[in-house]
Amino acid sequence: MLLVLLVLMTVTGIAIPNYRAFEIEKEEQRYFELLQQDVYFAQSESYRSKTPIMVVFREASHSSEVVQTFRGALLSRKMPESVQLKKTSNLKEIHFTGNGSISGSGTLNFETSAGIKSIVVHLGKGRVVFSE
């Protein structure tokens, strides 16, 4: 009986810390998938409405927002605690013009539990590349 209890405690002691790391990784993955969908939404909405729309990263509230000029925030998402926008990023927002193209290029770097993830914004027809 004592042996069974020892095995059970060992398995539990190993599984719980591993589950927390798995949970954090999945939360980050879910956030970046939603962020990618938000960027595509912002681009298509700017093209549809013929007005500028931005995806803005707010450090103070630790969130990202899709903002339309003169209407305010269309949607807002909290970043996971394990995701931080790095100071080396040369962009703080992704700005789409009224025809769906990008108005400024650059890179957004995020520090995550799994390493650095980048969003590269190219000038022109609105290409935004997500990389790990």
Image (tube, grey):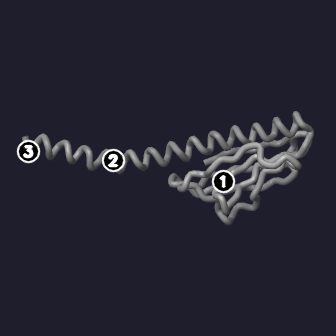
Dot in front, 1 or 2? 1
Tag 2 or tag 1, which sits nearer the N-term? 2
The amino acid sitting under disc 1 is Ser
Q: Between 88 and 71, which is closer to the camera in this rendering?
A: 71
Q: Residue at x 81, y 39 (%)?
A: 43
Q: Between 61 and 131, which is closer to the camera in this rendering?
A: 61
Say which residue label 1 marks.
63
Label 2 environment density (alpha carbons within 10 Å; few <14, some 14–19, many ≥20) = few
Residues at badges 1 and 3 in contact (C-beta under 8 Å)? no
- The quarter holding residue 106 reads bottom right
Q: Between 28 and 117, which is closer to the camera in this rendering?
A: 28
Q: Residue at x 77, y 54 (%)?
A: 93
The amino acid sitting under disc 2 is Ile
Spatial distance from mark 1 to mark 3, Cα to Cα?
A: 50 Å
Say which residue label 3 marks.
2
Task: Tell me: residue 71, above or below residue 40.
Answer: below
- Looking at the image, the residue that sits furthest to the front is 71
- The quarter holding residue 110 reads bottom right
Say which residue label 2 marks.
16
Residue 86 falls left or right of residue 28:
right
Q: Where is residue 115 in the image (x, y as percent from the top left)?
A: 54, 55
- Looking at the image, the residue that sits furthest to the bottom is 87
Q: Residue at x 72, y 49 (%)?
A: 65
Q: Residue 112 carries which label?
A: none
